[in-house]
Amino acid sequence: MSIKFKFSLFLTFCFINLGLLSFGQSIKEQAVWYGYFFTIPLSQKWHNVTELQERHLVRPIQQNQFMVRTRFHRNLGKNLDASTGLSLFLHHKIGELENDDINWPEIRPHLDISLKTKLRKLTLDQRFRGEIRFFQNFDSNHTVLLDGFFFRAYRSRYRLQASILLAKPWGEKTLNLKLAEEIMGMIGGDYSKFTFDQNRISADLSLELSRNIQLELGYVYWHQTRNSGGFLDQHIFRTYLRHTLDFTKNKKKAEMPAF
Protein backbone atom coordinates (compact mmCIF):
# COMPACT_ATOMS: atom_id res chain seq x y z
CA MET A 1 0.00 0.00 0.00
CA SER A 2 1.57 3.32 -1.09
CA ILE A 3 2.02 6.35 1.17
CA LYS A 4 -0.27 8.45 -1.01
CA PHE A 5 -3.00 5.83 -0.81
CA LYS A 6 -2.72 5.63 3.01
CA PHE A 7 -2.88 9.39 3.32
CA SER A 8 -5.88 9.60 0.96
CA LEU A 9 -7.60 6.90 3.02
CA PHE A 10 -6.98 8.90 6.20
CA LEU A 11 -8.45 12.10 4.71
CA THR A 12 -11.46 10.21 3.34
CA PHE A 13 -12.08 8.72 6.79
CA CYS A 14 -12.04 12.21 8.35
CA PHE A 15 -14.37 13.84 5.83
CA ILE A 16 -16.86 10.96 5.81
CA ASN A 17 -17.16 11.25 9.60
CA LEU A 18 -17.50 15.03 9.36
CA GLY A 19 -20.36 14.61 6.90
CA LEU A 20 -22.14 11.98 8.96
CA LEU A 21 -21.92 14.02 12.14
CA SER A 22 -23.60 17.05 10.58
CA PHE A 23 -27.05 15.43 10.77
CA GLY A 24 -29.42 15.95 13.70
CA GLN A 25 -30.39 18.96 15.81
CA SER A 26 -27.43 20.74 17.35
CA ILE A 27 -26.41 23.88 19.23
CA LYS A 28 -23.58 25.73 17.50
CA GLU A 29 -20.83 27.65 19.33
CA GLN A 30 -17.50 29.27 18.56
CA ALA A 31 -14.59 29.00 20.99
CA VAL A 32 -10.92 29.89 21.38
CA TRP A 33 -8.35 27.73 23.20
CA TYR A 34 -4.97 28.95 24.48
CA GLY A 35 -2.40 26.47 25.74
CA TYR A 36 1.12 26.27 27.14
CA PHE A 37 2.80 22.84 27.23
CA PHE A 38 6.17 22.25 28.85
CA THR A 39 8.15 19.04 28.67
CA ILE A 40 10.81 18.04 31.19
CA PRO A 41 13.09 15.13 30.20
CA LEU A 42 13.75 12.98 33.28
CA SER A 43 15.90 10.24 31.78
CA GLN A 44 16.40 8.42 28.48
CA LYS A 45 13.18 6.50 29.13
CA TRP A 46 11.03 9.00 31.04
CA HIS A 47 9.73 12.54 30.53
CA ASN A 48 6.97 14.68 32.01
CA VAL A 49 4.52 16.86 30.07
CA THR A 50 2.40 19.49 31.85
CA GLU A 51 -0.17 21.58 30.04
CA LEU A 52 -2.22 24.64 30.95
CA GLN A 53 -5.23 25.57 28.86
CA GLU A 54 -7.77 28.38 28.93
CA ARG A 55 -10.88 27.88 26.81
CA HIS A 56 -13.55 30.51 26.26
CA LEU A 57 -16.59 31.03 24.08
CA VAL A 58 -16.77 33.82 21.52
CA ARG A 59 -20.48 34.73 21.36
CA PRO A 60 -20.88 35.80 24.10
CA ILE A 61 -17.29 36.14 25.32
CA GLN A 62 -17.14 34.08 28.50
CA GLN A 63 -14.97 31.44 30.09
CA ASN A 64 -15.83 27.88 29.14
CA GLN A 65 -13.09 25.74 30.75
CA PHE A 66 -9.74 26.01 32.46
CA MET A 67 -7.61 22.89 32.74
CA VAL A 68 -4.28 21.65 34.07
CA ARG A 69 -2.95 18.24 33.03
CA THR A 70 0.30 16.55 33.94
CA ARG A 71 1.44 13.17 32.66
CA PHE A 72 4.53 10.98 32.87
CA HIS A 73 5.63 9.24 29.68
CA ARG A 74 7.62 6.01 29.43
CA ASN A 75 9.42 5.14 26.19
CA LEU A 76 8.64 1.47 25.49
CA GLY A 77 10.51 1.24 22.19
CA LYS A 78 11.47 3.19 19.11
CA ASN A 79 7.87 4.08 18.19
CA LEU A 80 5.92 3.07 21.30
CA ASP A 81 5.08 5.29 24.27
CA ALA A 82 2.85 4.95 27.35
CA SER A 83 1.81 7.56 29.89
CA THR A 84 -0.21 8.04 33.04
CA GLY A 85 -1.39 11.31 34.48
CA LEU A 86 -4.05 13.46 36.12
CA SER A 87 -6.14 16.40 34.92
CA LEU A 88 -8.04 19.11 36.78
CA PHE A 89 -10.85 20.81 34.84
CA LEU A 90 -12.89 23.82 35.94
CA HIS A 91 -16.11 23.83 33.90
CA HIS A 92 -17.73 27.26 33.93
CA LYS A 93 -21.48 26.96 34.50
CA ILE A 94 -23.83 29.92 34.20
CA GLY A 95 -26.91 29.95 36.39
CA GLU A 96 -30.13 31.91 36.11
CA LEU A 97 -28.97 34.59 38.57
CA GLU A 98 -26.08 37.03 38.19
CA ASN A 99 -24.25 35.57 41.20
CA ASP A 100 -24.94 31.99 40.11
CA ASP A 101 -21.76 31.48 38.07
CA ILE A 102 -19.87 28.39 39.24
CA ASN A 103 -16.59 26.76 38.25
CA TRP A 104 -17.44 23.05 38.49
CA PRO A 105 -14.29 20.99 39.25
CA GLU A 106 -13.59 17.67 37.55
CA ILE A 107 -10.68 15.34 38.38
CA ARG A 108 -9.66 12.99 35.59
CA PRO A 109 -6.90 10.34 35.92
CA HIS A 110 -5.86 8.60 32.70
CA LEU A 111 -3.70 5.93 31.09
CA ASP A 112 -2.73 5.88 27.42
CA ILE A 113 -0.48 4.22 24.88
CA SER A 114 0.74 5.68 21.57
CA LEU A 115 2.12 4.00 18.47
CA LYS A 116 3.94 5.91 15.72
CA THR A 117 4.53 4.86 12.12
CA LYS A 118 7.05 6.95 10.16
CA LEU A 119 6.80 7.07 6.36
CA ARG A 120 9.31 9.54 4.91
CA LYS A 121 7.73 12.99 5.39
CA LEU A 122 4.58 11.53 6.94
CA THR A 123 4.19 10.29 10.53
CA LEU A 124 1.04 8.47 11.64
CA ASP A 125 0.32 8.50 15.37
CA GLN A 126 -2.33 6.31 17.01
CA ARG A 127 -3.25 6.99 20.63
CA PHE A 128 -5.53 4.92 22.88
CA ARG A 129 -6.52 6.63 26.13
CA GLY A 130 -8.71 5.56 29.05
CA GLU A 131 -10.02 8.12 31.55
CA ILE A 132 -12.03 8.06 34.78
CA ARG A 133 -14.16 11.16 35.36
CA PHE A 134 -14.98 12.46 38.85
CA PHE A 135 -17.04 15.64 39.39
CA GLN A 136 -17.52 17.63 42.59
CA ASN A 137 -20.91 17.19 44.25
CA PHE A 138 -23.72 19.75 43.78
CA ASP A 139 -26.76 20.50 45.88
CA SER A 140 -30.18 19.52 44.50
CA ASN A 141 -30.58 22.90 42.75
CA HIS A 142 -27.13 22.72 41.12
CA THR A 143 -26.22 26.14 42.55
CA VAL A 144 -23.88 25.25 45.46
CA LEU A 145 -20.82 23.01 45.40
CA LEU A 146 -20.61 20.42 48.17
CA ASP A 147 -17.70 18.47 49.62
CA GLY A 148 -16.59 15.31 47.86
CA PHE A 149 -16.67 13.97 44.31
CA PHE A 150 -18.88 11.49 42.48
CA PHE A 151 -17.98 9.03 39.72
CA ARG A 152 -19.43 10.12 36.39
CA ALA A 153 -18.15 7.58 33.85
CA TYR A 154 -15.25 5.77 32.24
CA ARG A 155 -14.29 7.29 28.92
CA SER A 156 -12.30 5.65 26.13
CA ARG A 157 -10.61 7.70 23.39
CA TYR A 158 -8.96 6.75 20.11
CA ARG A 159 -7.06 9.34 18.08
CA LEU A 160 -5.47 8.97 14.66
CA GLN A 161 -3.10 11.78 13.69
CA ALA A 162 -1.04 12.44 10.57
CA SER A 163 1.91 14.85 10.75
CA ILE A 164 3.23 16.01 7.38
CA LEU A 165 6.50 17.87 6.88
CA LEU A 166 5.70 20.87 4.66
CA ALA A 167 8.97 22.82 4.64
CA LYS A 168 12.14 23.80 6.46
CA PRO A 169 11.84 27.59 6.27
CA TRP A 170 14.89 28.41 8.42
CA GLY A 171 17.64 25.83 8.17
CA GLU A 172 16.65 22.73 10.13
CA LYS A 173 13.54 24.33 11.69
CA THR A 174 10.42 22.63 10.36
CA LEU A 175 6.88 23.58 9.40
CA ASN A 176 4.43 20.68 9.80
CA LEU A 177 0.74 20.12 9.11
CA LYS A 178 -1.10 17.97 11.65
CA LEU A 179 -4.43 16.37 10.75
CA ALA A 180 -6.26 14.35 13.39
CA GLU A 181 -9.52 12.69 14.27
CA GLU A 182 -10.46 11.50 17.76
CA ILE A 183 -13.58 9.61 18.78
CA MET A 184 -14.74 9.06 22.38
CA GLY A 185 -17.28 6.89 24.17
CA MET A 186 -18.40 6.53 27.80
CA ILE A 187 -19.68 3.71 30.00
CA GLY A 188 -20.38 3.19 33.69
CA GLY A 189 -21.72 5.67 36.24
CA ASP A 190 -24.39 7.65 34.40
CA TYR A 191 -24.18 5.29 31.39
CA SER A 192 -25.62 1.78 31.53
CA LYS A 193 -24.14 0.87 28.13
CA PHE A 194 -21.29 2.12 25.95
CA THR A 195 -22.44 5.46 24.52
CA PHE A 196 -20.99 7.83 21.93
CA ASP A 197 -19.65 10.95 23.63
CA GLN A 198 -17.89 13.12 21.07
CA ASN A 199 -15.83 13.36 17.91
CA ARG A 200 -13.08 15.90 17.18
CA ILE A 201 -11.53 16.64 13.80
CA SER A 202 -8.60 19.04 13.73
CA ALA A 203 -5.97 20.65 11.54
CA ASP A 204 -2.91 22.48 12.93
CA LEU A 205 0.19 24.17 11.57
CA SER A 206 3.23 23.56 13.78
CA LEU A 207 6.28 25.81 13.40
CA GLU A 208 9.60 25.39 15.19
CA LEU A 209 10.69 28.77 16.57
CA SER A 210 13.85 27.32 18.13
CA ARG A 211 15.33 23.95 19.06
CA ASN A 212 13.01 23.63 22.08
CA ILE A 213 10.01 25.82 21.21
CA GLN A 214 7.12 25.16 18.83
CA LEU A 215 4.12 27.34 18.00
CA GLU A 216 0.88 25.70 16.83
CA LEU A 217 -2.13 27.37 15.23
CA GLY A 218 -5.14 25.28 14.37
CA TYR A 219 -8.84 24.57 14.05
CA VAL A 220 -11.02 21.92 15.75
CA TYR A 221 -14.50 20.76 14.85
CA TRP A 222 -16.07 19.39 18.07
CA HIS A 223 -19.26 17.31 17.86
CA GLN A 224 -20.64 16.13 21.22
CA THR A 225 -23.79 14.49 22.55
CA ARG A 226 -25.72 16.73 24.97
CA ASN A 227 -27.23 15.27 28.15
CA SER A 228 -30.48 17.11 27.43
CA GLY A 229 -30.67 15.68 23.91
CA GLY A 230 -29.28 16.64 20.51
CA PHE A 231 -25.69 17.68 19.91
CA LEU A 232 -23.23 20.45 20.62
CA ASP A 233 -21.12 21.60 17.66
CA GLN A 234 -18.16 23.86 18.42
CA HIS A 235 -15.89 25.54 15.90
CA ILE A 236 -12.65 26.13 17.78
CA PHE A 237 -9.57 28.18 16.97
CA ARG A 238 -6.60 27.18 19.12
CA THR A 239 -3.02 28.30 19.64
CA TYR A 240 -0.48 26.29 21.63
CA LEU A 241 3.08 27.03 22.70
CA ARG A 242 5.18 23.90 23.32
CA HIS A 243 8.39 24.25 25.29
CA THR A 244 11.01 21.62 26.16
CA LEU A 245 12.92 22.49 29.32
CA ASP A 246 16.09 20.52 28.64
CA PHE A 247 18.55 20.86 31.54
CA THR A 248 20.94 18.22 30.24
CA LYS A 249 24.26 18.93 28.55
CA ASN A 250 23.25 16.87 25.54
CA LYS A 251 22.22 19.38 22.89
CA LYS A 252 20.72 16.81 20.54
CA LYS A 253 17.36 18.05 19.28
CA ALA A 254 14.54 16.80 21.52
CA GLU A 255 11.47 15.19 19.94
CA MET A 256 8.27 16.87 21.07
CA PRO A 257 5.46 14.55 22.19
CA ALA A 258 2.22 14.37 20.24
CA PHE A 259 -0.49 16.78 21.36
Image (cartoon, rainbow, N blue to C red):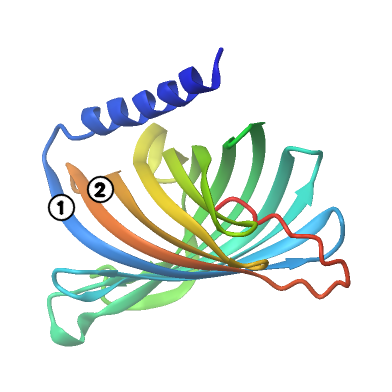
Residue beneath label 1, please?
28
Nearer to us: label 2 or label 1: 1
- Side (left or right) of 36 relative to 196: right
Q: Position of residue 143 (x, y in %)?
A: 26, 76
Locate the N terminus by quadrant: top right
Rendered residue at 50%/44% (across/down): 154
Rendered residue at 64%/44% (across/down): 112
- Side (left or right) of 57 relative to 245: left
- Side (left or right) of 153 relative to 73: left
- Side (left or right) of 179 relative to 243: left
* Residue 159 - label: none
Tell which of 78 and 154 is nearer to you: 78
Q: Can residue 159 be seen here? A: no
* Residue 227 - label: 2
Q: Can residue 178 be seen here? A: yes
Q: CA distance from mark 2 to mark 1?
A: 15 Å
Tell which of 139 and 257 is nearer to you: 257
Give above or below for 158 relative to 8.
below
The local secondary structure at tag 2 comes to: loop
Residue farthest toward the top in the current orientation of the protein: 1
Disc on the earlier residue, 2 or 1:
1
Q: Position of residue 43 (x, y in %)?
A: 86, 61
Quadrant of residue 123 within the rendered picture: top right
The kind of residue on which mark 2 rests is: Asn
Number of numbered discs: 2
Q: Neighbour class for label 1 at 10 Å: few (<14), some, many (≥20)?
A: few
Q: Position of residue 238 (x, y in %)?
A: 36, 62
Rendered residue at 49%/56% (across/down): 206
The kind of residue on which mark 1 rests is: Lys
Rendered residue at 65%/33% (across/down): 118
